[in-house]
Image: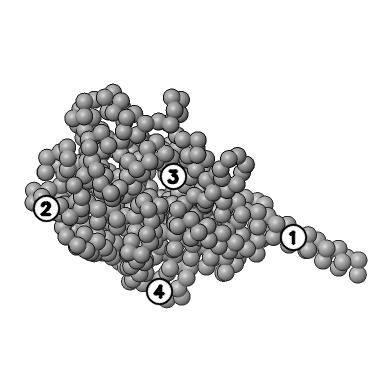
Amino acid sequence: MSGGASTDMVALIVFILFFGVTIVAGSTVSRWRGRLSSNKAPEKAVQADGHGAEDWGLGGRQFGAWITWFLVGGDFYTAYTVIAVPALVYAVGAYGFFALPYTIIVYPFIFVVMPRLWDIAHKAGLGTAADIVRARFGSRTLELAIATSGLVAVMPYIALQLIGIRTVIEALGLPGDVPLVVAFVSLAAYTWFGGLHAPALTAFIKDIMIYIAVIAAVTVIPLHLGGYGHMFEAMNTTLPPPDGEHVLKPAQMAPYATLALSSALAAFLYPHTLTGILAAKSADTIRQNAVYLPIYTIVLGLIAMLGFMAHVAGVDTHSSSLVVPLLFQKIFPSWFVGFAFAAIAVGALVPAAVMAIGAANLLTHNILPSRYDTVNGARIAGLVVKLGALFCVLFLNAQFAIDLQLLGGVIILQTFPALIMGLFKIRYSSVGMLAGWVIGTLVGLGLCWMDGLKPVHAVPLGGDAPTLISTGLIALIVNLLVVGVVTLAGQLAAGRSGSAAVTK
């Protein structure tokens, strides 16, 4: 079975019901917030009704621990989780589980670093990574560089969400380009009218739906396949381990580890994840979320196993993105298929909206003139970003859907020195940061282009064959070296100038 199958009307009706209700609820949230606010305090009605760029783009910086937990989790666990990770596991086996250690590594990073970033942003009224970098280094050029990286990096990530929505609509049997059109229009309307309040509200709906679908999948599907024991025995035949002691081939170990590390370092540099952090009402809210967010990692591990289950269930497809939809169609009745597909689509819609809003904030705050820093300016900017993501879907020929996210990671990692190292007391020069960003970005994009958009590059480290290393990590190391060398050279030059002045 593949995309383009006959339409299942029951599944389609259930899908439209749940997906449509979510879009309507998110698109109208700012209007009913405005009515409630106007009844309480007329002077706050303008802000609550969405007529403020900060309210549209950062939710007024008022989200507490509960909403932030759903919002950050909602924009962190996306179609990447539900479509791309199982697809990679289906195609390559245990190697696809690199997403689990990366989500474990990232939470201590959030706990230590993100409250500090929030504190800086809150005190100075900053709304983006580029704002924070400009405040730290006083360089308009470096600000533009960081904003451009965030803008470009998030487009392939939004493209991955569009692919997630398109995939389930294709599986329902809608023909041709209709699934992609529906995916784009629904995202555009949802974001335009709702702003950040839309995903903040519907993240609750999304997570409940995802949990129901996942719990059903990891209980019903193994029972249908004869139990977990039988399923893993069958997997040893379908995707046999390389030997009796390891589940990864020797050549997969280095890319597995480096992709996990580079993904963890990149995860909260993206505009959407940082937007969820900056929208929190306090630094303690962020720390609380860093403690509880690992619950999502458990869900991710269960979802990844759907790739194994698809093999045992006999799912056969040349499009790895269709693995999960085809598995659900094979096991569940039509009404639950429609519900599960709606959960997947909403699971892509919510983070895609936050991504578009985060990118729009970069455009209006840091790239365009200040007169565009309005609600309508942000809405138009968000639409432009979504169009860019649409072009990524149409023209980036990545082998796996997950590669789109990893390619974005190569770009966004180059903001790590300026944004994170800029928090330390060591004085790195803005010239060094800019030089590192330029060279790191060129190296990363150049290697990706040479490798056919694959996120790993072969490095000769000795042995019989080159070692595959995360391209983003290679580019980041180059970036850091350049930052260190240029900063040190500048300090030495300044020291010599100072000495010469004293001598004279």
Q: Nearer the viewer, mark 1 or mark 2?
A: 2
Disc marking residue 82:
none
Residue at x 32% of width, y 30% of height: 237
Counting residues from the N terminus, which is met first, the one under dot 3 or under dot 2? 2
Badge 4 vs badge 2, beta-carbon distance below 8 Å: no
Badge 4 vs badge 1, beta-carbon distance below 8 Å: no
Q: Which residue is mark 4?
A: 372
Q: Which residue is mark 1?
A: 489
**Mark 4–mark 1 distance (CA, rounded to whole Å):** 39 Å
Does residue 113 appear in this view? no
Question: Mark 1, residues whose alpha carbon is within 10 Å: few (<14), some, or many (≥20)?
Answer: few
Counting residues from the N terminus, which is met first, the one under dot 4 or under dot 2? 2
For mark 1, give the secondary structure. helix
Counting residues from the N terminus, which is met first, the one under dot 4 or under dot 3? 3
Counting residues from the N terminus, which is met first, the one under dot 4 or under dot 1? 4
Q: Is residue 85 above or below residue 427?
A: above
Residue at x 45% of width, y 57% of height: 452
For mark 4, give the secondary structure. helix
Q: Nearer the viewer, mark 3 or mark 1?
A: 1
| Amino acid bearing label 3 | Ile
Left or right: 82 in relation to 422: left
Q: Which residue is mark 3?
A: 286
**Mark 3–mark 2 distance (CA, rounded to whole Å):** 46 Å
Q: Which residue is mark 2?
A: 6
| Amino acid bearing label 1 | Ala
Q: Quick one: which residue is furthest to the right in this view? A: 503
| Amino acid bearing label 2 | Ser
| Amino acid bearing label 4 | Tyr
Left or right: 49 in relation to 149: left
Question: Mark 4, residues whose alpha carbon is within 10 Å: few (<14), some, or many (≥20)?
Answer: some
Residue at x 33% of width, y 71% of height: 380
